[in-house]
Image (cartoon, rainbow, N blue to C red):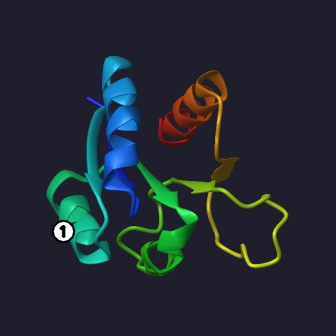
Amino acid sequence: MNKIIVINNDLDGMGLLKTWLESKGYQVTITSSKDEMFSLIQQSRPGLVIADIMQSQAVEELKEDCTTVDIPVLLMSGYAMGHENIHLDVEDTIEKPFNLPLFAKKVDDLFQLRA
C-alpha cells in the first residue's frame, strides 16, 4: 500500500483530505509535529510527504537528511507559488484551495517518480 505522511498545523482540516486519499487506496497519517513526522518516517518509510508551507522547517530538515532526501514532497500553500519566501527543494507544489483532480494527479505522479 502506498503510504503518505501529511504534516500540517490544521489537523481538523486535513481529516477530509485523509479520508479522500484513503478512498483512493493510500494509507495516510497526519501529524502537526516535526518530531513525530520523522518518527513516522522511520517506522513506515512513506512514498510521499505532503507538507503545508507553515511546516517549511520540517521540509528543510527532511531534504537535508541523507536518509530521507529521496522521499518526494508535495508542498501545499495558500500563497501564490511564485511567492519570494518559498525556497524549498520539493518535487511539486499546489496552491490552496486546490481542486481534487489536480491534487490526485500530482500525488499519483509523485508516486510514479519513485517507481
Task: Tell me where residue 44 appears, x and y as whole percent.
Answer: 19, 51
Q: Residue 74's x, y, as percent? A: 56, 51
Q: Nearer the viewer, residue 89 or 104?
A: 104
User: In x, y percent, where is residue 61?
Assistant: 44, 80
Q: Which of these two is toward me, 20 or 89?
A: 20
Q: Residue at x 47, y 35 (%)?
A: 115
Q: Residue furthest left?
A: 43
> What residue occupies the far front of the structure in this picture?
12
Q: Does 115 sit left or right of 10 as displayed?
A: right
Disc 1 crowd, CA 10 A, few/some/many (<14, 14-19, 20+):
few
Please name the residue shown 64% across and 69% down the image: 89
SS assignment at label 1: helix
Relative image position of residue 33 (x, y in whole percent): 28, 71
Report whether residue 47 is seen.
Answer: no
Q: Name the amino acid, label 1.
A: Ser
Return the residue nearer the eye: 7 or 65. 7
Query: Which residue, given by chain and number where applicable, does mark 1 sit on?
Result: 39
